[in-house]
Image (cartoon, grey):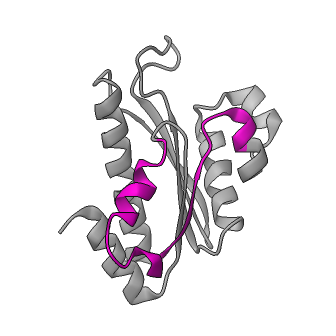
Amino acid sequence: MTRAETLLTMAREKGLWLATAESCTGGLVAAAITDVPGSSAIFDRGFVTYTNAAKVEMLGVAVTTLDRHGAVSEEVAAEMAEGARTRSGAQIAVSITGIAGPGGSEHKPEGRVCFGLATEQGVRTELLDFGPLGRDQVRIAARDHALDLLIKAVEAA
């Protein structure tokens, strides 16, 4: 069983709705979930907010947060996740913002990805450095980690 199939089964059993807010993955998490037949029973919507303007307009990320911390930050990931949760019918939302590559900088290297997880109990964040695996592999690793975060959140709900 794939991660997305496991997630679908668990969320359906608990009657939970999910949402995603994605930047560097460009919708890969939403695609993985909606690839599974029956996902409409648990997946409300996905936001692909690649630009800062989209993060502000669609998710309510504060311009001041972007200015202070940059798009690739746990602070922005937190606001993205909470924005996706509050702007949807979901009880749980995950967010991803990062540098898939190529490129990056000394302070924000290629492979750095920030995740946010918003539930009715609050928001938590994680920062992972996958390293310079290449764009495709960073995006896949980030997708898989986000699915794992959702599975754990559903388990705990």
Q: Up-down: is 77 above or below 149?
A: above
Of 69 and 7, the residue lying toward us:
7
* Position of residue 155 in the picture relative to residue 20 (left or right): left
* Residue projecting furthest to the top: 106
Query: Left of 121 or right of it: where is 150?
Result: left
Q: Residue at x 31, y 69 (%)?
A: 36
Looking at the rendered image, the quarter that the N terminus falls into is bottom left
Q: Is residue 124 left or right of residue 12?
A: right
* Left or right placement of residue 63 versus residue 10 in this view: right
Q: Which residue corresponds to the image point at 27% horizontal and 72% vertical from the top-left? A: 6
Q: Is residue 8 magenta?
A: no
x 35%, y 27%: residue? 135
The magenta-colored residue range is 26-55
Number of numbered tags placed on the structure image: 0
Residue 146 image point, x, y percent: 40, 53
Residue 43 in picture, x, y percent from top left:
49, 71
Q: Nearer the viewer, residue 103 or 27?
A: 27
Q: Quadrant of residue 152?
A: bottom left
User: x and y percent of residue 141 in the render?
Assistant: 31, 41
> As displayed, is residue 118 above or below residue 154?
above
20 is higher (above) or lower (below) than 48? below
Percent coordinates x, y for residue 81 in the rendering = 61, 55
Residue at the spot 31% in from the left edge and 80% down from the top edge = 9
Nearer the observer, 53 or 66:
53
**Quadrant of the rendered image containing residue 132:** top left
Residue 41 in the magenta stretch? The answer is yes
